[in-house]
């Protein structure tokens, strides 16, 4: 990864985000304590003091939230460094996390579950921790994407090797919400995997905003990056359906996917007009439809951002920027069609049928009393309809400028103000150039323009298979056999004596090989070999990854000397008891929610049979028992009704607590 101490603009923003996350965490804890005291006390004087303290804490949280929103709209840092005259694109900030020490939990699990010397795996554990640390500061290029994907794929191996479905191993993952700054803590690896996926999508958005939008190649790369970002976020939404973090909720991810596709559509329009827009009839018709499509998709994004529950968590400035872009591009569409009507009169050599067909495709319906062919032929009608479109363009431009002026964050983005002002002045100038004597008689209202595009924009699914990774814990053996779900006896050694050149048993399977057709009276059976045992070592040589022929070859090469075999027997997978855990959900107004898992082993009554409990999040294809109990701290906010969530084929959420 990048140097975390490097004084780049992007690293400064991430450091500020980390500081804000800690401040929000402290304020949230203070608020939870004050709410508990408020509910517990009956002393009126104490209640008054607590209510006063709560008002201060709520004010602090609101201020911190606004500061975090300011970081999310700091789009200038992520744009291309060269001089540009384009509306800024919005990237996603990377989710922050705390350090995780895998050393003791994994070493204990290797010793207890795999019965191997855990000191031999210290380098592998260190490699895993180094990779995780590097993923906190990925470089803003394809190398950074590849590193994040490598860690995500490595987590798949780690999950299968060390995270059994029936108990926790004591590794606590903490990730901060990208929009609210509230931490989410869990002992389940699915939170880690989902957060890494979110950061892959966020990094793609940062790559897209960094592309040079003044070149054809830069715009192509930007379109590709935003489509890939949308694909990763869509994959996250479909795969991890119950993540307890607002920024990864299905509703929020749905909005983010729409926003990334809208930005890709915007780059496509810029790509079409990069070489200049010719003042030619059919060229302007095409540009009108394309830019109307951009305005439409941003209108849909703005509508989605203002729906519950996303409205309370999405940065206010993002919603306003989507509204501004929708108005701006709709204004451009009306400007282009006004240029068609005002500057291009029907000439004797023109194909009026083609022009009529092209112009009719721009409208769903013409104003009352007007026909497309009549407008093309009549100079006065052309002028009147053209000026009506210019008036509507000016209205949209003024609305975009008004909204921009009302938003404090957007008002400070100079290039945005410059682009909007220049487009507004251009429409005003065009309108001033037209004859004005008939304005009193013109009652024509410009009709809406039908959007249309020839360029398909869609999500690009993540290609994880293109990144090749090797399991750090390859030495433990084939994952199909040596996984956290399987349990075996400790390795036992038997001395095998050849009898008349016969082994007394056969071998089958891939790696490792398995004993079958065992002769019950052979020396191997007498030494303790059983049907179905796995051979993991021959003569002190590890053979977990060897096939049948290779193991037989080793046995034959021993000759008449006795050979020692290390054998393991598969046990029935018995569900071990949990350490008692609880999920604490602090009731916070609107956006703030804290989720924290706590170990509480000392309080378990070992004299009673404890019911089987599962992690807060777990993979599965069958219904299992409910997760550990959920404790909701008292809150001034009214409790929400419990909602039974639908199980997806990918993720099984063992809780009924509604988190967003």
Image (tube, grey):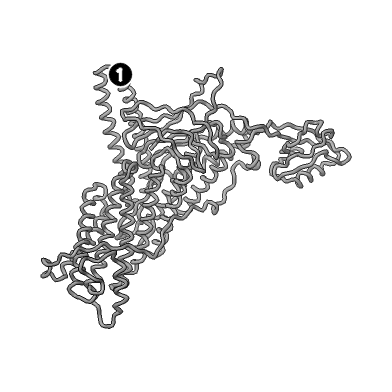
Look at the image and tell me whether residue 115 can be seen: no
**Quick check: 371 above or below 47?**
below
**Quick check: 297 above or below 481?**
below
Which of the two residues, 440 or 481, is positioned nearer the viewer here? 440
Residue drawn at point x = 60 percent, y = 36 percent: 484
Look at the image and tell me whether residue 649 can be seen: yes
Which of the two residues, 508 or 200, is positioned nearer the viewer here? 508
Residue drawn at point x = 12 percent, y = 67 percent: 441
Pick the quarter of the image with the C terminus: top left
Image-based side of 407 in relation to 268, left or right: left
Which of the two residues, 611 or 94, is positioned nearer the viewer here? 611
Q: Residue furthest front?
A: 369
Residue 156 screen position, x and y as percent: 55, 43
Q: Residue furthest right?
A: 500
The image shows a total of numbered marks equal to 1
Residue 494 screen position, x and y as percent: 78, 32
Write down the quadrant of residue 642 in the picture. Answer: top left
Image-based side of 379 in relation to 134, left or right: left
Write down the quadrant of residue 44 in the picture. Answer: top left
Q: Residue furthest bottom?
A: 349
**Quick check: 108 above or below 49?**
below
Residue 461 screen position, x and y as percent: 48, 53
Q: Secondary structure at mark 1?
A: loop
Residue drawn at point x = 33 percent, y = 48 percent: 304
Residue 525 screen position, x and y as percent: 80, 33
Image-based side of 243 in relation to 613, left or right: left
The 10 Å Cα crowd at callout 1, few under 14, some 14 to 19, many 20 or more, is few
Reading the image, the residue beneath label 1 is 41
């Amino acid at each position: 990864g990048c140097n975390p101490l490097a004084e780049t603009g992007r690293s400064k923003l991430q450091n500020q985000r980390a500081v804000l996350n800690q401040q929000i965490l402290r304020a949230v804890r203070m608020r939870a304590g004050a709410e508990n005291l408020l509910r517990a006390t009956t002393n009126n004087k104490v209640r008054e003091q607590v209510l006063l303290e709560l008002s201060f804490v709520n004010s602090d949280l609101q201020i911190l939230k606004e500061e975090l929103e300011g970081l999310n709209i700091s789009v200038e840092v992520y744009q291309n460094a060269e001089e540009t005259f384009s509306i800024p694109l919005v990237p996603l900030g990377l989710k922050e996390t705390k350090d995780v020490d895998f050393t003791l939990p994994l070493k204990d699990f290797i010793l207890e579950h795999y019965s191997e010397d855990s000191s031999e795996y210290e380098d592998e554990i260190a490699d895993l921790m180094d990779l995780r640390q590097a993923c906190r500061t990925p470089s803003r290029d394809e190398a950074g994407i590849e590193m994040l994907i490598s860690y995500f794929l490595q987590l798949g191996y780690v999950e299968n090797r060390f995270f059994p479905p029936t108990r926790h191993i004591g590794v606590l993952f903490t990730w901060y919400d990208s929009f609210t700054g509230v931490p989410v803590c869990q002992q389940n690896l699915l939170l880690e995997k989902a957060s890494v996926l979110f950061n892959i999508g966020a990094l793609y958005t940062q790559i897209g905003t960094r592309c040079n939008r003044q070149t054809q190649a830069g715009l192509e790369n930007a379109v590709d990056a935003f489509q890939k970002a949308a694909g990763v976020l869509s994959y996250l939404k479909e795969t991890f359906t119950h993540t307890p973090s607002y920024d990864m909720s299905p509703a929020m991810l749905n909005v983010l996917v729409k926003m990334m596709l809208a930005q890709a559509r915007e780059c496509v329009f810029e790509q079409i007009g990069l070489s200049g827009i010719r003042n030619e009839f059919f060229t302007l018709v095409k540009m009108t439809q394309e830019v109307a499509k951009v305005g439409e998709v941003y209108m849909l994004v703005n509508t989605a951002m203002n729906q519950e529950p996303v409205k309370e968590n999405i940065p206010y400035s993002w919603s306003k920027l989507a509204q501004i872009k929708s108005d701006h591009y709709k204004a451009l569409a009306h400007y282009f069609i006004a240029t068609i009507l005002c500057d291009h009169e029907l000439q004797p050599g023109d194909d009026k049928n083609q022009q009529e067909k092209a112009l009719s495709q721009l409208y769903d319906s013409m104003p009352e009393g007007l026909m497309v062919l009549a407008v093309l032929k009549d100079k006065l009608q052309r002028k009147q309809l053209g000026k009506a479109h210019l008036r509507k363009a000016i209205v949209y431009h003024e609305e975009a400028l008004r909204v921009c002026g009302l938003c404090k964050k957007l008002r400070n983005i100079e290039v945005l103000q410059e682009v909007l002002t220049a487009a507004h002045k251009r429409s005003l100038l065009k309108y001033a150039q037209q004859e004005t004597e008939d304005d009193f008689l013109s009652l024509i209202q410009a009709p809406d323009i039908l959007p249309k595009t020839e360029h398909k924009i869609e999500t690009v699914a993540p290609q994880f298979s293109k990144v090749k990774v090797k399991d750090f814990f390859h030495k433990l053996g084939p994952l199909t056999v040596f996984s956290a779900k399987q349990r075996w006896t400790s390795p036992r050694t038997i001395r095998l004596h050849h009898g008349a050149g016969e082994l007394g048993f056969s071998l089958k399977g891939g790696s490792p090989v398995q004993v079958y057709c065992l002769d019950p009276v052979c020396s191997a059976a007498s030494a303790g070999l059983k049907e179905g045992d796995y051979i993991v070592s021959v003569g002190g040589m590890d053979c977990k990854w060897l096939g049948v022929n290779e193991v037989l070859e080793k046995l034959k090469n021993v000759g008449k000397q006795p050979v020692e075999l290390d054998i393991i027997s598969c046990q029935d997978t018995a569900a071990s008891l949990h350490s008692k855990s609880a999920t604490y959900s602090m009731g916070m107004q609107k956006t703030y929610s804290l989720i924290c898992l706590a170990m509480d082993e000392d309080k378990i009554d070992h004299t009673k049979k404890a019911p089987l409990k599962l992690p807060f999040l777990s993979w599965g294809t069958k219904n299992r028992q409910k997760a550990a109990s959920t404790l909701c701290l008292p809150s001034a906010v009214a409790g929400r009704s419990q909602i039974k969530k639908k199980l997806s084929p990918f993720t099984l959420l063992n809780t009924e607590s509604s988190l967003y």
